[in-house]
């Protein structure tokens, strides 16, 4: 899952660079899900509970919102943009669910 997240984020950066859309003003201020994807990678590698809390509460909410109302931009469905968006947010959601079900991490009241 970590490899897929890294490939997904890396391909997004490469696509934007290739087509000339990469600009520091638009790509550097990371969105919430971009930050959560990085945290999810570290969470999956190191099995860190504190990162799990962030990814669980912020990542699941942001990923579900993005999956329910995806931004396809001007391209529409069968384009790289929307497929990458759906894959990235799906991986974010899956990583939090994986840590909850498989690794046995559970959020508690103190996590809030």
Image (cartoon, helix red, strand yellow):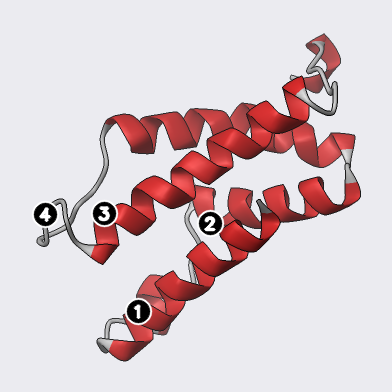
Badge 4: how crowded within 10 Å, few (<14), some, or many (20+)?
A: few
Rendered residue at 27%/62% (across/down): 81
Q: Quadrant of residue 3?
A: bottom right
Badge 1: how crowded within 10 Å, few (<14), some, or many (20+)?
A: some
The answer for how far apart the CA atoms under marks 1 and 3 are is: 12 Å
Rendered residue at 85%/37% (across/down): 50
Give the side of residue 47 with respect to residue 33, left or right: right
- The image shows residue 64, relative to residue 11, as above or below, that is above
Q: Earlier in the sequence, mark 1 or mark 2?
A: 1
Q: Earlier in the sequence, mark 2 or mark 4?
A: 2
The answer for how far apart the CA atoms under marks 4 and 1 are is: 16 Å
Q: Earlier in the sequence, mark 2 or mark 3?
A: 2
Nearest the eye: 53 or 10: 10
Give the side of residue 53 with respect to residue 104, left or right: left
Which residue is tagged 4? Answer: 76
Rendered residue at 41%/70% (across/down): 12
- Answer whether residue 59 is visible to the viewer in this image: no
Rendered residue at 38%/31% (across/down): 65
Circles 3 and 4: CB atoms closer than 8 Å: yes
Q: Secondary structure at mark 4?
A: loop
**Mark seen at residue 34:** 2
Badge 2: how crowded within 10 Å, few (<14), some, or many (20+)?
A: some
Nearer to us: label 1 or label 2? 1
Which residue is tagged 3? Answer: 82
């Amino acid at each position: 899952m970590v490899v897929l997240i890294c490939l997904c984020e890396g391909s997004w950066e490469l696509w934007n660079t290739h087509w000339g859309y990469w600009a520091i003003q638009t790509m550097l201020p990371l969105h919430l899900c971009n930050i959560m994807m990085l945290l999810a990678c570290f969470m999956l590698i190191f099995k860190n509970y504190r990162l799990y809390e962030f990814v669980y509460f912020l990542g699941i909410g942001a990923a579900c919102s993005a999956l329910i109302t995806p931004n396809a931009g001007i391209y529409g469905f069968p384009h790289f943009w929307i497929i990458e968006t759906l894959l990235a947010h799906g991986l974010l959601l899956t990583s939090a669910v994986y840590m909850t079900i498989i690794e046995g991490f559970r959020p508690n009241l103190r996590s809030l």
